[in-house]
Image (cartoon, coloured by chain):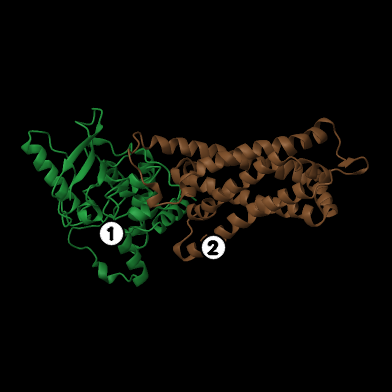
Amino acid sequence: MNLTLKIWRQKDSSSKGQMVDYKVTDISEHMSFLEMMDVLNEQLVNSGEEPVAFDHDCREGICGMCSMYINGEAHGPDRGVTTCQLHMRMFKDGDTITIEPFRAAAFPVIKDLVVDRTSFERIQQAGGFISVNTSGNTQDANSIPISKHAADEAMDAATCIGCGACVATCKNSSAMLFVGAKVSQYALLPQGQIEATDRVLNMVAQMDAEGFGNCTNTGACEVECPKGISLDNIARMNRELMKASI
Amino acid sequence: MSGFFKSSIGRKVAMALSAFFLMFFLLQHLAINLLSVFSPEKFNEVSHFMGTNSLVQFALQPVLIFGVVFHFVMGFVLELKNSRARNISYAKNNGAANSTWMSRNMIWSGIAILAFIILHFIDFWFPEINTKFIQGDWSGLHNGEFRYFHELQEKFVNPLRVGAYVTAFVFLGLHLAHGFTSAFQSMGATAGRKKTLQTIGKAYSIIVPLGFIIVALYHHLNHNH
């Protein structure tokens, strides 16, 4: 298939960016979106132009590195996938595809389609962990009884790969689905109880300090999340914060 | 606790609490309005009680006004903060792919409701304040009869005003269609209750505005002028 690509080009974080049109030809419908980008970049390199910078790592849908806002949706029009798992069969010959970086004040553009998501790291560092003595006498996790239901829900929350699609999609650039998932995965387990109060207070405070917007429960994040993280995690975080504040 | 209400989630909770209060008030307001359709005498009696009872006038009314003002001001403050959280807009954004129009446009349905409240205050509240607090007339009488039903019917003679009221109630319905479940979600409602809440929310957001519309249309079509 032959496509027209409208891509955000930005030299560096301090430069002003703009949308630039490119044509790509002979794209196979079996290619992943990133492979199509590779074809474009090979074309650009061969003609002496600067290739388009974009994030990627595992290309297996599990690392959360690839981003891109494709035709007005985070990770493109498919559901439950990251951009690396988005295939070109989702598009038609002759289509024009708009490709932009994830947009949020807390995700500044580094170059072209690459954004700085270290604000997520700082939120994690504020409380997204449990303090465990790892000097060799750690208690076997399997010796602590946990209900199947709680274990399943905690695991579902823990599947969040921190890609930032929730922030990119949310009309308010809110990070509450991400933070809700990270708070929930510990709130549901006995190991997370000891630091539960500080965790939710510190993580929410850091989230606010990073300049993310406020959740208005549109549910867009849940729809666009490649891992299907549920809005229930936001509700649980709200309950945890209320509990911690009273 | 003061730190809680300064946090993003605390503000969500504050919005939800004021929304619960206002949604309860709407039910009470609708119930009294419906009396005007079924029994003008009862409507006059209840209106007189609400308009002259000290608890309603000096305790509940200020709380209501605070609730309305708080919900609007906080709504605008949060909208401003949220718009700052994305400094560059998308060239192409397909919001309809993942969320409802109502959920994305709460600020616009809210502004429409605010415009209506201003009109509603000019129509009913300011004249009421003038009669009671400026002229000092707490009798509720006009020419020896209760004035409330008569005043209500008079207001709905003009088709333009009726049209404005009906339009505003449509926006109220759109606002509630998202707002009802959103308030519960902000308060931490869980998945188990989500479906029930959505059903109740849908029913509330249709029945309540429709009730107000029916009352306005009824008096427009049945006025004695």
Left/right placement of residue A230 relative to residue A160 reads right
Q: Residue at x 60, y 48 (%)?
A: B170
Q: Nearer the viewer, mark 2 or mark 1?
A: 2
In the depicted structure, whether residue A224 falls above or below residue B64:
below
The one of A85 and B190 positioned closer to us in this rendering: A85
Q: Position of residue B213 (x, y in %)?
A: 67, 50
Residue wearing tag 1: A159
Label 1 neighbour load within 10 Å: few <14, some 14-19, many 20+: some
Chain that is coloured green in the picture: A
What label sits on residue A103 in the rendered view? none
Residue A180 in view (yes/no): no
**Which subunit holds the residue at mark 2?**
B
Q: Residue at x 53, y 39 (%)?
A: B74
Amino acid identity at mark 2: Thr
Chain B hue? brown
The one of A4 and B48 positioned closer to us in this rendering: A4
Q: Residue at x 78, y 54 (%)?
A: B37
Left/right placement of residue A14 relative to residue B105 reads left
The one of B116 and B163 positioned closer to us in this rendering: B163
Residue A228 falls in image quadrant: bottom left
Residue A108 in view (yes/no): yes
What label sits on residue B199 in the rendered view? 2
Give the SS element for disc 2: helix
Amino acid identity at mark 1: Thr
